[in-house]
Image (cartoon, helix red, strand yellow):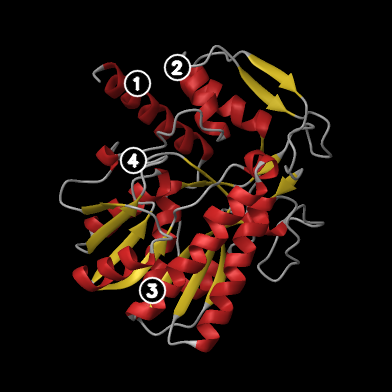
């Protein structure tokens, strides 16, 4: 019995692989390495370089490694890029996910955990937002993920195939043991960008929009530590393997921080003052989005262990310093 992790050489996927290994699971990674890194996959894990849309390859991996579950992270994730290239996002996030599902069902995989997003809610009228609130995405990114949720729902109703879709809020931080972290060049994640600025990797950073209807005019988000997020995936996997039915869960802490709050935290933890410049709003960014996460806690028994903004920043800073040393050594 093994778990296939798509996108397992990337940021969240590499943390997932470590969590599975830490509890003695067999893991196989499928990644095209477009944004992931071969070095992020531990040597004892089989890495197949390829595309999730290649159904023959997926069926071969499932049969060859005894895969009984898939945790699906692979996809495109930058909201403004999705506005500029909607068809590319529908291809990577929706069309190829459909191909992956079809291959999984054909190969007899029964359990599927999907990396969805809070972007399916669009700009919610009330916060915190619950799983039962309207899903009205305002970006092709959010729409591409919501369509995949619909396909999972319908496929599960028609086949012996159960899924959990986890709607991420803003993922940040790094492995507390320093084994992996956010390594993508030119990443747009706020905490990563702020940490890079604090360490001198960038000479300045930008705040996109200062006139939102929030407490300080900047966007408010619910930041979740990547290790707590991948723990939610383990809980979802156990739920499905134990016979649990299909479901959708928010993944967040039910607490929001503004862009300026995050910058203040990075300055506080790093002890450095950042060069912060104001810029216009970006397309597709809602003013505020915070999770209601009690359903995840009640149904799956999920308990966060790193729900502190300063700790998230501290782990992200430590990883950025380690990454800089890795790049310097080639």
| Cα gap from disc 2 to disc 1, whole angstroms | 9 Å
Query: At numbered mark 1, what does the secondary structure look like: helix, strand or loop?
Result: helix
Left-right relation of 27 to 50: left
User: Mark 4 highlights which residue?
Assistant: 176
Circles 3 and 1 in contact, beta carbons < 8 Å: no
Left-right relation of 213 to 306: right
Q: Nearer the viewer, residue 110 or 196?
A: 110
Closer to the N terminus: mark 4 or mark 1? 4
- Classify mark 4: residues with Cα within 10 Å, few (<14), some (14-19) or many (20+): some
Instruction: Work out which quarter of the rendered image holds the C terminus and state it.
Output: top left
Closer to the N terminus: mark 2 or mark 4? 4
User: Mark 2 highlights which residue?
Assistant: 199
User: Mark 3 highlights which residue?
Assistant: 104
- Classify mark 2: residues with Cα within 10 Å, few (<14), some (14-19) or many (20+): some
| Cα gap from disc 3 to disc 1, whole angstroms | 38 Å
Going 63% across and 55% down the picture, which residue do you hit? 118
Position of 327 relative to 86 (above/below): above
Res 276 quadrant in image: top right
Circles 2 and 1 in contact, beta carbons < 8 Å: yes
Res 262 quadrant in image: top right
Front label number (2 vs 4) = 2
| Cα gap from disc 3 to disc 4, whole angstroms | 33 Å
Front label number (3 vs 2) = 3
Query: At numbered mark 4, what does the secondary structure look like: helix, strand or loop?
Result: loop
């Amino acid at each position: 019995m093994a778990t296939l992790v798509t996108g397992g050489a990337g940021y969240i996927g590499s943390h997932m692989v470590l969590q599975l290994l830490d509890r003695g699971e067999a893991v196989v990674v499928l990644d095209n390495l477009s944004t992931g890194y071969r070095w992020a996959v531990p040597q004892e894990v089989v890495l197949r370089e390829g595309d999730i849309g290649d159904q023959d390859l997926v069926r071969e991996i499932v049969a060859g490694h005894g895969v009984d579950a898939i945790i699906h992270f692979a996809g495109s994730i930058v909201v403004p890029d999705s506005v500029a290239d909607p068809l590319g996002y529908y291809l990577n996030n929706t069309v190829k996910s459909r191909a992956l599902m079809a291959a999984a069902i054909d190969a007899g995989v029964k359990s599927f955990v999907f990396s969805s997003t809070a972007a399916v809610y669009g700009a919610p009228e009330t916060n915190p937002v619950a799983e039962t609130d309207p899903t009205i995405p305002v970006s092709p990114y959010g729409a591409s993920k919501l369509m995949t949720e619909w396909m999972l729902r319908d496929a599960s109703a028609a086949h012996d195939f159960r899924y959990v879709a986890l709607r991420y809020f803003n993922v940040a931080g790094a492995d507390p043991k320093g084994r992996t972290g956010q390594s993508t060049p030119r990443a747009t994640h706020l905490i990563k960008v702020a940490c890079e600025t604090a360490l001198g990797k960038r000479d300045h950073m930008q705040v996109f929009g200062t006139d939102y209807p929030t407490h300080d005019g900047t966007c408010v988000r619910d930041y979740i530590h990547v290790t707590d997020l991948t723990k939610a995936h383990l809980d979802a996997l156990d739920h499905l393997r134990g016979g649990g039915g299909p479901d959708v869960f928010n993944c967040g802490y039910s607490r929001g921080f503004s862009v300026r709050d995050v910058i203040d935290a990075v300055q506080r933890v790093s002890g450095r003052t950042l060069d912060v410049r104001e810029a216009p709003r970006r397309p597709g960014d809602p003013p505020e989005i915070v999770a209601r996460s009690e359903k995840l806690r009640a149904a799956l028994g999920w308990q966060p262990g790193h729900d502190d903004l300063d700790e998230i920043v501290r782990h992200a800073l430590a990883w950025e310093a380690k990454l800089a040393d890795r790049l310097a050594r080639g």
